[in-house]
Image (cartoon, rainbow, N blue to C red):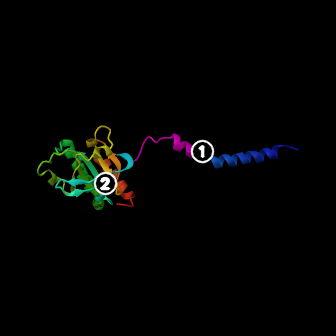
Amino acid sequence: MSNAPVRNKLSSLWLIIALTTAPVAASYLIYYFWKPGHTVNYGDLIGPLPLPDTALALDDGVPFRFSQLKGKWALVSLDSGNCAAHCDEKLLYMRQLRLTQGKDAERIERVWLISDDVQPRAGMMARYPGTWLVRAAGAGLSGFFPAKRAAADHIYLIDPLGNLMLRFPRDPDPRRMIKDLARLLRASQIG
């Protein structure tokens, strides 16, 4: 009697086992050992990190909390009230970024967290109507905005649930920022 039929059955069994376990093994190898070299997003993903709902005040003294913005996306700049050229550029980018979203622009708020006690120049905010001017000096919020060098280098994005989730680089490419925000707004079921 020959062992050939038994060998054929064992070969078939091993082939079936290999075919069923190969996709699972490949998925584990890809998940744990393969890091993609390219991502779709332009900004740096952060967390999501929940922001503390610290009691702050607007520039005119009216109380403000980030929870007031729940349900909306928020572009945030942290900078001095002096607002040098880079600060002014960030405020311009935030305004333009919001305007480029068309009908979704109403889903986006803009916040300038003033990190010191310096009063912004008279008439400066006339160029950025609708931007929340929030006094944040002494609130310790800068530690919640991760940065490679300084929080003032970046524009941040807060999701509608109040989580810090994205940081755009210093001197960003506005076209790529627009794509990131449009993609998020399109995918989001909230805000």
Tell me the residue at 73%/48% (across/down).
Answer: 13
Asked whether 30 falls inside the magenta stretch, the response is yes
**Mark 1 — residue?**
25
Image spot of residue 25 (x, y percent): 60, 45
Residue 99 shows which numbered tag?
A: none
Instruction: Tell me the crowding category of disc 2: few under 14, some 14 to 19, or many 20 or more residues within 10 angstroms, Cα based.
Output: few
Given residues 117 and 130, the one toward you in this image is 117
Of the residues shown, which amino acid type is indicated by label 2? Asp
Tell whether 28 sits left or right of 161: right
Q: Do the CB atoms of the residues marked 2 and 1 lie less than 8 Å apart?
A: no
Tell whether 148 sits left or right of 92: right
**Mark 2 — residue?**
53
The span picked out in magenta is: 26-40
Tell me the residue at 53%/43% (across/down).
Answer: 30
Given residues 80 and 1, the one toward you in this image is 80
Q: Is residue 146 above or below residue 70?
A: above
